[in-house]
Image: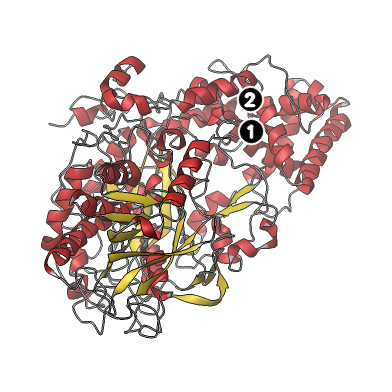
Amino acid sequence: MADPTIDLDLAAVLDESRRLAAAITPDSGPWDAIVVGSGAAGGMAAYQLAMSGIKVLVLEAGRMLDHRKEYRTMEWPYASPRRQRLPPDHRALAVAEYNFLDRPYGNHPAFAKHKKLASYAGNSYTRNWVVNEKEHPTTGTPYSWVRARVLGGKTNFWGRVAIRYGPLQFQAASRDGFDIDWPFGYDELKPYYDKVDLLLGVSGTREGLDQVPDGIYQRAHKLNCVEMHFKDAVEKMGRRYIAGRAGVTTDGVLGNKYRTRCLGRGRCSRGCDIGATFHSPTALIFPARDSGKCVVRPYSVASEVFLDPETGRAAGVRVIDANTREVMDFKAKVVVLGAGCLDSTRILLNSKSARHPNGMGNSTGLLGCYLSEHHMGPRGSGFIPTRIGTETTLDDGRPTSPYIPRFRNVTDKHPDFIRGYHFQGGGGSHEYPSHAHDTPGFGRGFKSSVRRYYPAQFAIGGFGEVLPRKENRITLDDTVKDAWGIPAVRFHYRFSDNEIRMAKDMADTAEEMLRAAGAENIKIDPTMLPPGWSIHEIGTARMGDDPKASVTDRFCRLHDVPNVYMADAAPFVSGGTQNTTWSILAMCWRTMDHLKEDLRTKTSL
Amino acid sequence: MTTPLVSRRTALKALGAATAFLPWLSEEGEAAFAEIQKRKAPPRLEVLTSAQYATVEALVEAIIPADDRSPGAREARVADYIDLLLSEADAPLRKQWLAGLAALDAEAVKRFRAPFVRLPEEQMVALLTDISQYETAKPKADAGLEIPRNEQPKPLPPQVDSLMGDVRHPRDRPTLEAFFADTKQATIHGYYTSEIGIHKDLRYKGNQLLAEFVGCATVDGKDCPHCGRKARS
């Protein structure tokens, strides 16, 4: 079946990828720094270093990206005879399968007929970016780990919610006595959030809330009719319902020829072909490369960081070429890991030597522990009466839906759980009328009923903090390896009673707010989604000032090996309710400032 | 409504330097698929015979018919979409669905002495009303409010590879009811992803190039003609 949306011609970018991989060898250096990964963390690291004149080698495990061709932003579903379904040789894991099937998921015989088994995030737009679970097995407890191996990683299809951690996160332990605070407060990171806002562009409204501190916002999107109605209702309850904060430039950014301002098409998750949405390639990697100080080597699977036996410092990164399987040692003065929290941690766990028998940076045995993310799932929907039976309006021409900031354990103390959750969601005339599947009947009555409720749809879903607990951890699997022979991640991760009680409260408050808004046909689903669903993993190389109780110092540098820096969310102590990307960008910028200072002042580097 | 749409030309101008990178893939995709969208292009069937195709056309049109607002599932070529789903489904599912289609005809012959495709509208409606009875029982999706709270999710059986409907639900319904339910879900998906479903029936307004974001008119300090909310001072 010919399908123009599936049969993309990627010959040019595949050629480019092979050409770069062949041309860049360990002899092509020297480099000052090696950055592993090219997503939010690797992209920001490469950008900061290259723009300061530091020679950077970026190692990307996947291929390069043809953003002009692969971001199919405005494609209509009828462009494909399959209507956005995957072709038969591709398959994405379904939600129920994560908890039910044995790990590795790709080993299940039902998937033998599929060439590629993707995580739940695999769809007709992301299918060439997300990894094949058959090549990237995981073991242990269920975990829906979403990984993308392509230039830009998951930023090519991220959810765009760009919010800051605030005092409630940095001093969470001081407020409720659980675990520890971050080693510094919001004041320390605020200037970097500000810089990220200015460099990359973020839209939103200033609200003066401690839960989610204000940024430097460009033009915000507007709430639509059903959302204004919902806002009236929930704000009477003392809660807030505010415009979504999106990592999308709505007024444009200066000095980046790959990006332009948002035109309100609302198809951002497919990749934004005009570069309004922050994606690492257009926002960071291409400008870094244009500086002449940064080269990207695709198809470079980092297996470990290796030591200089003389100095005990990291000498470089061992790479397995994804295609040729050739093993190469790339050397540099410093190593920056930005492969994503779990993959960066995996690389360190796999970096075993006589000096570091349990993995690099793991003298405490804490590397891999304190895995945290956001639990999700409880959600509610209904129809807002003011728009039932009205004509369609343009309701989703925007990058993200509105936002209910955390309202639990902010000024009060909830009897059932500590920490809190937020909701994201909204409504109106979305392209696909999913309520039709729940509309009974057939014929003219059915059809007009679908239309009648179409503009009135409304739904919200919660994101809650998973407490950072030592026993929630990853290790390397003793026997299962990935397609390149690198030990697979083994998950030891379960939700605690605090998460389960919080999820129950999410469902209750979702129902309470929908009732307050007078919604019709309210449906509440209290089911928690499988672990990992949020794609917000943090914490497995936690930072701290005490080398005996943490993996990195407060500047995300390994206590044990001082020229290895973590650029992603692995050092984060706790994650609040906030989506992680914007904090990764701010933290990485701060870490790179420190790295530059180390390079300038420390002759031992 | 004064939606501030900008024209393609204006948008290209506004984009300036970035225009060289714009792929406009959507339009190429549309052109490639335009043929099958046209009512008169003959179907290129992979699975269905022309007789079965005619029955499917009649069935999907009965589920989502033409009305005074928009054409129905027949003109939206939902039967072609179902043929494609069948061609890419596993053999047992394909067989099961085709058996359901045959059972529909058998039921029509038994009750009205004519195959489904030749039934007058009231007989079609009577037959479909009977085989859609299960929908009046409380559907799973509506049971949310009764689910005991504070439970970890129970593992569901894995989703068998099916392109038709939700086969995770136990198949304890009679063949015809299950067949109707699956076909209705496929019809909904096929119709509301078609040009006719999106643009003519729903009159979906997004996926446009906007000069300004659009919201409830009260956000801009005006009374809203769509929801009736009044401007607040």
Residue farthest to the front, as pictured: A27
Counting other residues with Cα less than 10 Å from the Cα at mark 2, is it few (<14), some (14-19), or many (20 or more)? many
Marks 1,2: beta carbons within 8 A: yes
Q: Nearer the viewer, residue A193 or A153?
A: A153
Instruction: Name the mark on residue B103.
Output: none
Image quarter where the C terminus of chain B lies is top left
Number of numbered markers? 2
Chain under callout 2: B
Q: Is residue A416 visible?
A: no
Residue assigned mark 2: B73
Q: Element at badge 1?
A: helix
Residue assigned mark 1: B187
State which tag comes first along the sequence, 1 or 2: 2
Whether B86 is drawn above or below A316: the answer is above
Mark 1 vs mark 2, CA separation in Å: 7 Å
Q: Position of residue B165 (x, y in %)?
A: 65, 44
Counting other residues with Cα less than 10 Å from the Cα at mark 1, is it few (<14), some (14-19), or many (20 or more)? many
